[in-house]
Image (cartoon, rainbow, N blue to C red):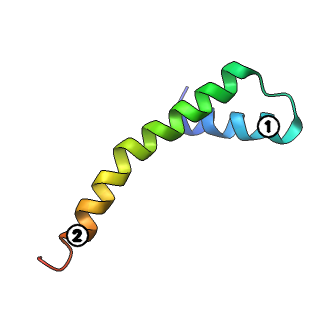
């Protein structure tokens, strides 16, 4: 399963009130993983934008 599907399933489950604890934890884990990967990359590219 891809990470976007996991996050979408978590949101869908939370909106309908049927999300299990496993789905919620998987959704939080995917979100944290995305932030850990893309936040430093974005900050690096933003800070070096004027130097290029």
Q: Position of residue 10 (x, y in %)?
A: 70, 34
* Residue drawn at x 67%, y 40% as measured from the top left: 8
Relative side of 15 to 28, left or right: right
Nearer-the-camera pick, 29 or 12: 29
User: Quick one: which residue is furthest to the bottom in this view?
Assistant: 50
- Secondary structure under the numbered disc 2 in the rendered image: helix
Task: Please identify the quarter of the rendering in which residue 14 is found.
Answer: top right
Marks 2 and 1, the one that precedes in the sequence:
1
User: Quick one: which residue is furthest to the left in this view?
Assistant: 51
Figure check: 39 above or below 46:
above
Relative side of 32 to 52, left or right: right
* Residue drawn at x 30%, y 61% as measured from the top left: 43
So how many labels did they put on this image? 2
Q: Which mark is residue 14?
A: 1
Q: Position of residue 37 (x, y in %)?
A: 35, 43
Q: Tell me the crowding category of disc 1: few under 14, some 14 to 19, or many 20 or more residues within 10 angstroms, Cα based.
A: some
* Residue drawn at x 48%, y 38% as measured from the top left: 32
Q: Which mark is residue 22?
A: none
* Residue drawn at x 62%, y 26% as measured from the top left: 25
| Quarter that holds the N terminus | top right
Q: Position of residue 33 (x, y in %)?
A: 44, 37
Q: Tell me the crowding category of disc 2: few under 14, some 14 to 19, or many 20 or more residues within 10 angstroms, Cα based.
A: few
Figure check: 6 above or below 15:
above
| Quarter that holds the C terminus | bottom left
For the residues labelled 2 and 1, the Cα–Cα distance comes to 36 Å
Marks 2 and 1 close (CB-CB < 8 Å) = no
- Secondary structure under the numbered disc 1 in the rendered image: helix
Task: Please identify the quarter of the rendering in which residue 21 is found.
Answer: top right
User: Which residue bears the numbered disc 2?
Assistant: 47
Relative side of 47 to 9, left or right: left
């Amino acid at each position: 399963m891809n990470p976007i599907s996991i996050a979408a399933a978590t949101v869908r489950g939370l909106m309908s009130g049927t999300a299990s604890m496993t789905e919620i934890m998987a959704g939080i884990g995917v979100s944290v993983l995305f932030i850990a990967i893309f936040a430093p990359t974005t900050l690096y590219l933003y800070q070096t934008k004027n130097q290029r």
